[in-house]
Amino acid sequence: MRAEIIAVGTELLLGQIVNTNAQYLSQELAALGMDVYFQTVVGDNMKRLAEAVRTASGRADVLIFTGGIGPTQDDLTKEALAELLGRTLYIDSEAMANVERFFQGRGVPMTENNRRQALAIEGGTPLPNETGLAVGNALSVDGKFYIVLPGPPKEMKPMFERQAKPWILEHVLTGEMPIYSRMLKFAGIGESALETRLLDLIQAQSDPTVAPYAKEGEVTIRVSTKAASESDATVKLDAMEREIASRLPEHLYANVDEPIEKTILDLMATRGLTLSAAESCTGGLLMEMFTALPGSSAVFSGGIVCYSNEMKEKLLNVPHDLLEGDGAPGAVSAETAKVLAEQVRLTVGTDLGLSITGVAGPAHSERKPVGLVYIAISRWGADTSVFELNLKGNRETIRLRAAKTLLYRLWRALQDNDVNSVSSASL
């Protein structure tokens, strides 16, 4: 079964937004056993949109559209598709009621063009929008399948997961056994190194299949299998997970799709531990990762962004002689990272304290190279662990990798129940 993704929106062609929808849908469709050979991006133009649909219909069984179903005159996806299929558009009553409730709740009048968001294609299945207003659509015509989804990812992803995917399983993949997948999450290892250690499993394309997905600072492995029942699938997925875990025990941190900071918070919560952080070159990035998660306040008590030397002295009592002067280690040093972690732990009053200090670039600092970063973990009753990192990349990449590496080191310390180590890592 072949699928093609058609992303609609002139803003995509102009580079004003990134087409993350295609990445998400490609991964989800692959997990369903569907091949995506083409991804198309087309602007808000009726003629060109029709051409894109005709081309895709000639080479794919399933066409999935994202975008172009909002309230304005340039939202043309449903109109173009309906015209090509010889179908009419109508106002879906449930979708219209949802739009009206939204404006009534805000206490503002609804403009007439918002009725466009409730349009549905004759003979199809309306897909309710639980996080927005524009209703989606799914329909089958002459052996082809068409699915229309919103453009905003916060609307598109829930609609695909809760509405479109069940429709695909019921109407498109009727002759197929269901596919079950498990996400294995890794940290502290790059995509190429992980692939090398799992290459035989990835290339085998046996059952279950193993496929890597990477993003900055972490790698995910999707393990997938077809099975007649969930219990049969679990047996096969468990066996493959054990094999992978035996090869990468020091990097596999979760078998669900969650960031490592979530795993850390859960581990610390079960142990009744609290955490604080002092950040220099990352400017609060690490703290943002923690506080973005619901319930993080049970573990993460707070922190300090001490970007300048003055703030390091005033707020965290870093000795002036450590930061400046002839022969001083400087702000970017193992000594300063150690003091920052220990002082933030004492200042905030937590069980553990974290710190990051370094040179994110693009200019050198203290005659030290861009990418030199020190991270530290302080715990009450134990020696402070300090790690030297030599990171590559631009400013944004260095900051993100520094924060992710500290999270990995903290996870390892929690796993080993041991932070009494000093080491050096070059990434």
Image (tube, grey):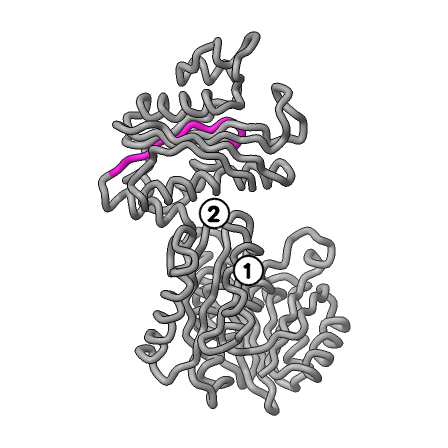
Quadrant position of the N terminus in the picture: bottom right
Quadrant position of the C terminus in the picture: top right
> From the viewer's perspective, is residue 376 above or below residue 108?
above
Q: Residue 277: within the magenta?
A: yes
Q: Which of the marked residues, 2 or 1, is nearer the chain's N terminus?
A: 2
Disc 1 target residue: 196
Mark 2 packing: few (<14 Cα in 10 Å), some, or many (20+)?
many
> From the viewer's perspective, is residue 11 above or below residue 127?
above
Q: Quadrant of residue 4?
A: bottom right
For discs 2 and 1, the disc positioned in front in the rendered view: 1
Residue lying at 51% horizontally and 14% vertically, measured from the top left: 323
Q: Are marks 2 and 1 in contact (CB under 8 Å)?
A: no
Residue lying at 58% horizontally and 38% vertically, measured from the top left: 391
Residue lying at 63% horizontally and 71% vertically, measured from the top left: 5
Q: Nearer the viewer, residue 119 or 369?
A: 369
Point out residue 199 in the picture as x, y percentages from the top left corner: 54, 65
391 relative position to 375: left or right? right
Residue lying at 34% horizontally and 82% vertically, measured from the top left: 229
- Residue type at the position of mark 1: Thr
Which mark identifies residue 188?
2
Q: Is residue 369 visible to us here? A: yes
> From the viewer's perspective, is residue 282 above or below residue 188?
above
- Residue type at the position of mark 2: Gly
Point out residue 51 in the picture as x, y percentages from the top left corner: 75, 76
Mark 1 packing: few (<14 Cα in 10 Å), some, or many (20+)?
few
Point out residue 368 in the picture as x, y percentages from the top left corner: 62, 24
Q: Is residue 104 visible to us here? A: no
Magenta extent: 273-282
Which mark identifies residue 82?
none
